[in-house]
Amino acid sequence: MRPFPSTSRLPCAIAIFCLVLGTSFLPLRAEPSKVPLTADSAVALAIKGNKELAAARFLVQEAAGRARGAGILPNPELEAEVAAGQDFEGRVVAGIMQRFPLTGRLRLERKLSDLDVQMAGLEVREKEWQLALSVRKAFCDLAAAREALAISSRQAQLAEAFAKTVAEGVDGGFRSKLDLQEANLSSSNLQAKAESLRGLEMESSARLSEWLGLSADASFTLNQKLSLPKSAPASRPAGNRADLKLAEMAVRSGETHVSLSKATSWDDVGVGVFVEGERFQDNPTGIEPEALAGLKLSIPLPLWQSGSGKVSEKEAARKRMGARLESLRFAVQNQVLLTYRVMSLRFQAASEFGAKVLPRANEHIRECEAAYGRGEVDLQAVFRARDRLADIELSDLEARKAYFLAYSEWLGALGESKTNP
């Protein structure tokens, strides 16, 4: 009969059993989910989650806080006066003084504050516009890096399959071992190139994560490829560019500053009410009390101050802003025209690769492999055709990437953030 386990070992065995049983029910560590992205959704996610942009939005709140205290009357002034003499003679005066501007200074201050709030919002919009351009470029870089990695991996797989075919020919006695060595060397070289592209893909992904406000190890699923549209988009004028609107708003602010500098040449006047009580000696009747109430007017002298120097300064600033606005409008028109022409040229070049060059290269490699199988060409001809095909596929990718980058530049020149090529 098998002996029972020792009672001294029983608690230890029970503890080990419970530990194993408990760990079997522990939740497995969840794999990080991949963020699905298109160019548009990447821009939207960046505008929502970028840390620098979130800090810039406080500029609007700061301007709104300043606006709440602008264009209001100053607090009234409480005035009091006490005078005493002999035999309980004296005088007590109490009043309130409120100062009012003679011009529309307060209205102009409120208008200037409102313009400051709108300009702060436009500054945030300008940062969003610049961020959108950077995100679109980063998205194109990541999409191109992943497609280049896929092309290299596919070429490596084809080379490996071709090496197996050559190995079968060596086993059959109608292929040389030198051909097999060349085939294996070509396959290993392509695999090494594919592995080297993984670093570029990781770097592009980390750069896009930074723009989106995510951690560097975030993973993405790209739901949009660098596929050419059927035709290039039609030309159109610049839209609602934030920097152009900001320059226009600066001109309006400069005009308001000129009006405000003229209005502040007139000092404020004070209007108040007061009550006065007085006790005085009136012989032979004795102490007589007296109470008075009235209005008080305070006018500074001189009432009008010469502010011609300040007015001239503000007028010069307004003219400078107007000249800058005209210069920016001219630059925007040229930028839109230039980026559209560049985009059109990039589209034509990419279309040429996709429609003519790449199909011919694929047909050539098929014919070379078939000719090698019939013994009409040597293995070097196949390798040259494969190398040429690899170069053409990568050149085709670079041409498509150049088009999408140029398209992003054109959208940026238009002041748009949507990417619908």
Image: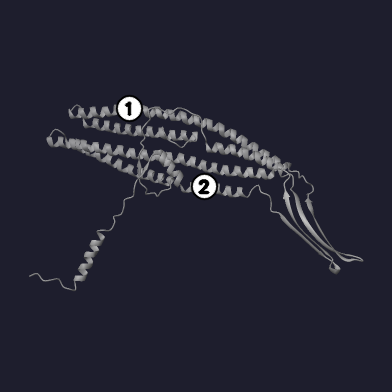
- The picture places residue 358, in percent across and down from the top left corner, at 31, 29
- The picture places residue 84, in percent across and down from the top left corner, at 82, 66
Query: Residue 56 got which mark?
Result: 2
Residue type at numbered disc 2:
Ala
Helix, strand or loop under label 1: helix
- The picture places residue 117, in percent across and down from the top left corner, at 58, 44
Q: Residue at x 43, y 33 (%)?
A: 407
Residue type at numbered disc 1:
Val
Quarter of the picture containing the N terminus is bottom left
Which mark sits nearer the N-terminus, 1 or 2?
Answer: 2
Quarter of the picture containing the C terminus is top left
Instruction: Please tell me how many numbered marks the rendered image carries.
Output: 2
- Quadrant of residue 227 within the rendered picture: top left
Cα–Cα span, label 1 and label 2: 48 Å
Residue that carries the numbered disc 1 in the rendered image: 357
Front of the two marks 1 and 2: 2
Q: Residue at x 23, y 61 (%)?
A: 21
Q: Is residue 136 left or right of residue 369?
A: right
Q: Residue at x 53, y 49 (%)?
A: 58
- The picture places residue 18, in percent across and down from the top left corner, at 23, 64
